[in-house]
Image: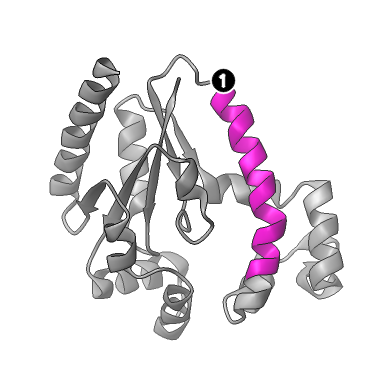
Amino acid sequence: MTKIIGLTGGIGSGKTTIANYFKEMGVPVYIADDEAKKIMQSKSVIEEIKSVFGEFVFDDKILNRAKLAEIVFNDSEKLNQLNAIVHPAVKKDFEIWLQKKQDYGFVIYEAAILFESGRYKDCDIVITVTAPEEVRIERVIKRDKTSREQVLSRMKMQWKDEERVSKSDFIIFNHNLKIAKEEVVKILKILNIKQNQS
């Protein structure tokens, strides 16, 4: 039975970089946020978004993700409504993907809101990626060409690092990429040992 390793971390922690490193090491990786973006273009999901959020978040029938993000990141109730549409579709998509990975001992399921969505309960092991808050803020400002205020409001919507860490099996401190990569190698060794014992 393929084990599911949940990989998470707050915005700007560099969890996708770590996920890609696992991928380089031969572990199949499912990036939930990337898949959600694709799923949000599907006809059924578009219709649901339209019925909940209205035509306002569309430009010429194309979903304007920036407009939608502006609404949901400032209103937790609206964020919950969006998650209620997208999460079940992502879960279904992941299950189909997982069926094709049964030859592997474990796979990585990378999600920003692994804990907030309750998906961590489906994982056998959870890894949290952390980094100092200021480093995270700088990374997101640079990456998304956004303001400090917007980054902080998005951070407020997510769990704090302490909460994630308390529920995780492994922690990767991603302040220095070389050291973080060494942590990935260590974790993989432990996972392989556990896999061989089971």
Residue 50 image offset from top left, x and y in percent: 84, 65
Residue located 17% across and 42% down the image: 183
Residue 173 image offset from top left, x and y in percent: 20, 55
Residue located 82% across and 58% down the image: 48
Magenta stretch in the rendered image: 80-100
Q: Is residue 81 left or right of residue 134?
A: right
Badge 1 is on which residue? Answer: 100
Residue located 80% across and 55% down the image: 46
Nearer to the camera, 61 or 83: 83
Identified by mark 1, the residue type is Lys
Quadrant where the C terminus sits is top left
Task: Residue 28: name its quadrant.
Answer: top left
Residue 30 shown in magenta: no
SS assignment for the magenta stretch, majority: helix
Colour scheme employed for the rendering of this structure:
one colour
Relative to residue 71, is residue 87 depicted above or below? above
